[in-house]
Amino acid sequence: MKKLYNASGHIKINLIERVLKEAKRKGNLPNVPSLKIKYFIESLEEEIKKFKSRVGTQINRREMEFLFKQMMRKDYDKITDRELKIIEEILLDKDFRIG
């Protein structure tokens, strides 16, 4: 079992897509179509690039919260705030494990 966050409290960015796909398969992402996971990953990558000076390359939980707030402030055509909120619950869970 792998944890989404490492021992120092930084999210493992390379696992985000895998975590979301597994969460979808397990039913933890109700009303979030699989295609929206791809859109979320693309949007998150854009936000990370934009705020790289603030969040750096290793992102902790607080910085993830900041990125979600930035994403919710924007009007994305491909993903709704409600879907972002559901994804946020998964990605901010420091104890989330994938198998």
Image (cartoon, rainbow, N blue to C red):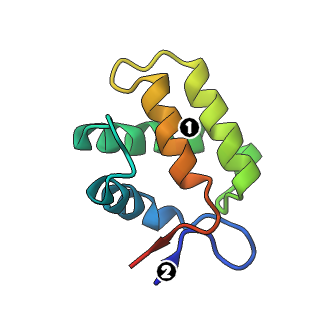
Give the residue type at disc 2: Lys
Residue 13 screen position, x and y as percent: 52, 62
Task: State which mark lies toward you, 2 or 1.
Answer: 2
Tell me if I can see residue 46 in this picture: no
Tell me if I can see residue 43 in this picture: yes
Counting residues from the start of the chain, the first of labels 2 and 1 encountered is 2
Mark 2 nearby-residue class (10 Å; few <14, some 14–19, many ≥20): few
Spot the residue most to the bottom. Answer: 1
Q: Is residue 19 positioned above or below 71 on the image?
A: below
The residue at 61%/58% (across/down) is 93
* Disc 1: which residue: 47
Give the residue type at disc 1: Glu
Marking on residue 20: none
The residue at 44%/66% (across/down) is 15
Lateral position of residue 56 relative to residue 73, left or right: right
Residue 68 screen position, x and y as percent: 61, 36
Q: Is residue 91 positioned above or below 3 on the image?
A: above
Quarter that holds the C terminus: bottom left
**Image quadrant in which you'd find residue 61:** bottom right
